């Protein structure tokens, strides 16, 4: 069936919204990861220099389930363009990061309007959630933005952290740069992009090199020209994040701890006391970086009253809250995936092996599934199979057939599951 123009427009706007959101969130995630890594280094250094007993690090730890709000602010320091909650559960030893799109619609209730009028003399009725701190002032972020987040997620937020993208550049410079391999685009060229409006100028040639603040920011922000689009950009960011973490945790970084700590504490705003920071860090000694999971509050974009808003799906919130904030399964002991053989499946071949999609269709249908369509994936040849799904829970069952596959969420698919075959299954 041919899609209407309005449907195509909505799909394009949703795709644009998702790209802008991911671009903003990844920069702040890198900063947050760096802050955590600095804390881990400081923690280990304190243990060595001062003795575990003196600091009480050998005492049994009480179980915690803490929620920390993380905000990335724009240039004027008021709009919270990145909004996340980091949930750390010491019983499951998992960190779950929930992102709330900046365009989430907020209908201010009477109590919120009265409080805003009392604090600032301003009025607000319907806004985006990132505008709440602009109306109230960043100093009242707990009274407005955080209270709204607590209401959406039905949780208590214990602490908050506010960071800027400047912190990312300063941190990379403080540790003496990060050695990383800059990728080449599909045509072999480097990463080149100029945006005078944002004062963003990226000019990086392929190969292993040490990047400092400005170039490091350019690497993680570059997105034009990857064959896999945003997926290619995110892969590059993950490579950089691994290299950054390795540099932060290396012995050569220890001598730079005073400078690093100065950057972190000068560029990060938080309501945490030093005692609370130390309390959090004690739990990270056994933490595995592989136990981090990312989520987005369920919802959809909608054009209304002349603006695009992200409308939260209230019907999906209870299950979402339970999965994220009430998880009782320890890391490494995940429940078996749900088997649902009624899903519609498309299999695409990205490799140079002719007939691979047809043979995989036969394999899946022999296992009881129905493959509705097969074809070729033309953008690029993938080294690793990727399974796309609107519901990632439905995608997990296919890891039994493609154990090395990566799972990616895509709510714009025509099928429940899209399997793009890579060179790893040959």
Image (cartoon, rainbow, N blue to C red):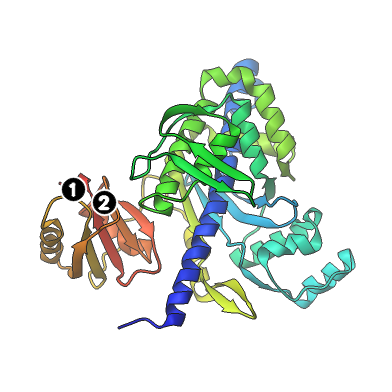
Residue with the mark numbered 1: 425
Q: Which of 282/375 is in front?
A: 375
Element at badge 2?
loop
Quarter containing the N terminus: bottom left
Q: Position of residue 276 (x, y in %)?
A: 69, 39
> Looking at the picture, does residue 212 appear above or below residue 106?
above
- Identify the image quadrant of residue 107: bottom right
- Report whether 396 appears left or right of 212: left
Q: Position of residue 370 (x, y in %)?
A: 18, 71
Residue 337: tell me if it is visible: no
Q: Which of 362/2 is in front?
A: 2
> Looking at the picture, does residue 192 appear above or below residue 156?
above
- Measure the alpha-carbon separation of dots 2 and 1: 7 Å
- Give the residue drawn at x 71%, y 29%: 262
Element at badge 1?
helix
> Looking at the picture, does residue 154 appear above or below residue 219?
below
Q: Earlier in the sequence, mark 2 or mark 1?
A: 2
Residue with the mark numbered 2: 385
Q: Residues within 10 Å of mark 2 (few under 14, many from 20)?
A: many
Q: Which of 238/216 is in front?
A: 216
Residue 415: tell me if it is visible: yes
Circle on res. 50: none
- Identify the image quadrant of residue 44: top right
Q: Position of residue 97 (x, y in %)?
A: 53, 52
- Give the residue drawn at x 45%, y 31%: 180
Decide: marks 2, 1 in contact (CB < 8 A)? yes
């Amino acid at each position: 069936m041919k899609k209407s123009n309005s449907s195509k427009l909505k799909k394009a706007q949703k795709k644009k919204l998702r790209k802008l959101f991911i671009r903003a969130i990844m920069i702040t995630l890198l900063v947050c990861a760096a802050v955590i890594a600095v804390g881990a280094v400081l923690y280990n250094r304190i243990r060595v220099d001062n003795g575990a007993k003196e600091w009480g690090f050998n005492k049994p730890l009480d179980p915690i389930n803490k929620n920390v709000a993380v905000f990335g602010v724009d240039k004027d320091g008021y709009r919270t363009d990145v909004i996340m909650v980091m949930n750390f559960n010491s019983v499951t030893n998992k960190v779950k990061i929930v992102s709330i799109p900046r365009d989430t619609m907020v209908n201010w209730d009477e109590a919120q309007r009265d409080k805003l009028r009392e604090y600032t003399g301003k009025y607000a009725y319907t806004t985006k959630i990132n505008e709440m701190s602009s109306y109230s002032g960043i100093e009242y972020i707990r009274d407005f933005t955080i209270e709204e987040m607590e209401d959406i997620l039905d949780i208590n937020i214990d602490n908050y952290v506010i960071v800027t993208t400047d912190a990312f550049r300063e941190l990379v410079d403080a540790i003496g740069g990060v050695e990383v391999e800059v990728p080449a685009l599909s045509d072999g060229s480097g990463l080149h992009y100029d945006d005078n409006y944002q004062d963003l100028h990226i000019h990086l040639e392929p190969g292993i090199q040490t990047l400092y603040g400005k170039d490091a920011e350019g690497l993680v922000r570059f997105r034009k020209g990857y064959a896999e689009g945003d997926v290619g950009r995110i892969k590059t960011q993950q490579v950089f994040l691994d290299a950054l973490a390795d540099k932060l945790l290396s012995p050569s970084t220890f001598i730079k701890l005073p400078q690093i700590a100065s950057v972190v504490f000068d560029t990060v705003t938080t309501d945490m006391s030093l005692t609370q920071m130390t309390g959090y860090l004690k739990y990270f000694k056994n933490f595995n970086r592989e136990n981090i999971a990312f989520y987005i509050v369920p919802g959809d974009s909608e054009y209304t009253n002349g603006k695009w808003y992200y409308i939260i799906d209230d019907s999906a919130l209870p299950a979402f809250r339970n999965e994220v904030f009430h998880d009782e399964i320890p890391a490494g002991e995940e429940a078996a995936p749900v088997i649902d053989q009624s899903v519609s499946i498309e299999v695409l071949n990205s490799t140079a092996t002719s007939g691979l999609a047809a043979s995989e269709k036969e394999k899946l249908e022999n296992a009881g599934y129905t493959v509705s369509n097969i074809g070729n994936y033309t953008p690029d040849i993938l080294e690793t199979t990727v399974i796309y799904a609107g519901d990632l829970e439905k995608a997990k069952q296919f890891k039994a057939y493609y154990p090395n596959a990566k799972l990616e969420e895509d709510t714009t698919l025509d099928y429940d599951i899209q399997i793009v075959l890579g060179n790893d299954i040959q």
